[in-house]
Amino acid sequence: MAAAVGRICGARLLKNYGIVTPQVCQLSTGAQGWTRNRKIWLSTLGVVSGGVGALLFALEQSVQASGSEAHPPHQPWSHDGWFKSLDHASVRRGYEVYKQVCKACHSLQYIAFRNLVNVTHTEEEAKAEAADVMIKDGPDEEGNFFERPGKLSDYLPSPYPNENAARAANNGAYPPDLSLIVSGRKGGEDYIFALLTGYMEAPAGVVLREGQNYNPYFPGGAISMAQVLFDEAAEYSDGTVATASQLAKDVSTFLRWCSEPELDERRLMTIKSMGMFTLMAVVAYYFKRHKWSTMKSRKLAYKPVSKK
Ligand code: HEC
């Protein structure tokens, strides 16, 4: 491409030595050749589209400003950054928090026990976790459904048989499935952490209905989930002190893993591809120098032709 442009320029210079053609002048001054109508149309179009754009921007800003919820502060997650992996001890503790606290109300339907293997648990431990729960299976040869201990291939069971049962047990509110909640909420794990630790007395003027609690991070402020994390609300098998913020941090990290189980692999891929692209860039640069060396070092000499 660049070579072609160079060749064309060179040829043109040779042909019109010392003369700038009028055609080139016209191209650079733009709108001179336009008709009056065309100018009016185009300026109207410019003004209208600019106005619509400004209106949309203003509307978008006003919506943001009217939100009553507090923005979750950013926490220094150890997995933040292009080359960082998840803290697997924390993911394991987070699973323990989910199992002891959140599981009572929230399902985790896209996580199977086999997913825990080599992430939070060894294969034997994951098998034991699975065997701890009863899974509905069937129909058997006589057409009956039955319950059996879980296997590695089973998904984590939901606490309620269906959405209506969940709503009935929670004052009409539906505890959402937590598998993808970190990707599904603005703020990700910062939001989950802020939500779990942010419960407070409702400020004056805020009226809560029966069963609702005040949480400034929840859109609208009135949330149907009560505060569930307190100091010692769950027990850790590794002896970590279970303060409320520790529980919230670990369960947020765990839910981040649930939303993006491929996170570690992706980060590893980043390191590999950066190495590869650096190598390729060096080779490409060398090759470019090699191919252009004849072009770059050539000399053009112009010889004025005398008029006869
Ligand atoms: C007693 C039942 C109960 C327990 C235990 C519980 N939740 Fe909830 N949770 C709810 C209900 C009900 C809602 C729906 C609230 C609403 O829509 O007002 C909810 C909503 C949520 C939401 C969604 C908020 C949003 O932005 O929509 C998240 C995240 C959440 N819970 C996380 C957790 C975590 C993490 C735990 C465990 C530490 C937990 N919950 C334990 C009942 C519970």
Image: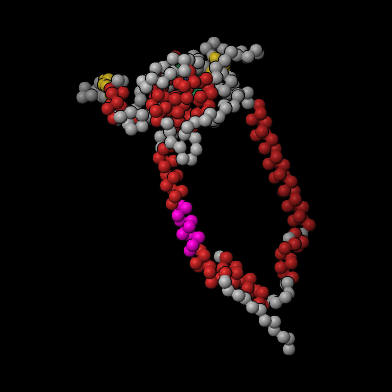
> Dominant secondary structure of the magenta stretch?
helix
User: Which of the pair 197/43 is nearer the observer?
Assistant: 197
- Please indicate, yes or no, whether residue 145 appears anywhere in the rendered image: no
- Please indicate, yes or no, whether residue 25 appears anywhere in the rendered image: yes
Residue 138 relative to residue 232: left or right: left
Q: How is the image coloured?
A: secondary structure
Rendering coords of residue 125 (x, y %): 29, 26
What segment is highlighted magenta in the picture? 277-287
Name the residue located 48 percent from the left edge and 60 percent from the top edge. Answer: 284
Q: Where is the N terminus found, in terms of image quarters?
A: bottom right
User: Which of the pair 89/223 is nearer the observer?
Assistant: 89
User: Which of the pair 250/179 is nearer the observer?
Assistant: 250
Residue 29 relative to residue 12: left or right: right
Rendering coords of residue 219 (x, y %): 58, 23
Name the residue located 45 percent from the left edge and 55 percent from the top edge. Answer: 279
Query: Which image quadrant for residue 60?
Result: top right
Residue 226 relative to residue 237: left or right: right
Q: Residue furthest right?
A: 36
Name the residue located 48 percent from the left edge and 63 percent from the top edge. Answer: 287
Query: In the picture shown, does residue 123 fall above or below 223?
Result: below
Q: Is residue 279 magenta?
A: yes
Q: Residue furthest left?
A: 141
Q: Is residue 86 magenta?
A: no
Name the residue located 65 percent from the left edge and 12 percent from the top edge. Answer: 204
Query: In the picture shown, does residue 139 fall above or below 264?
Result: above
Q: Where is the C terminus found, in terms of image quarters?
A: bottom right
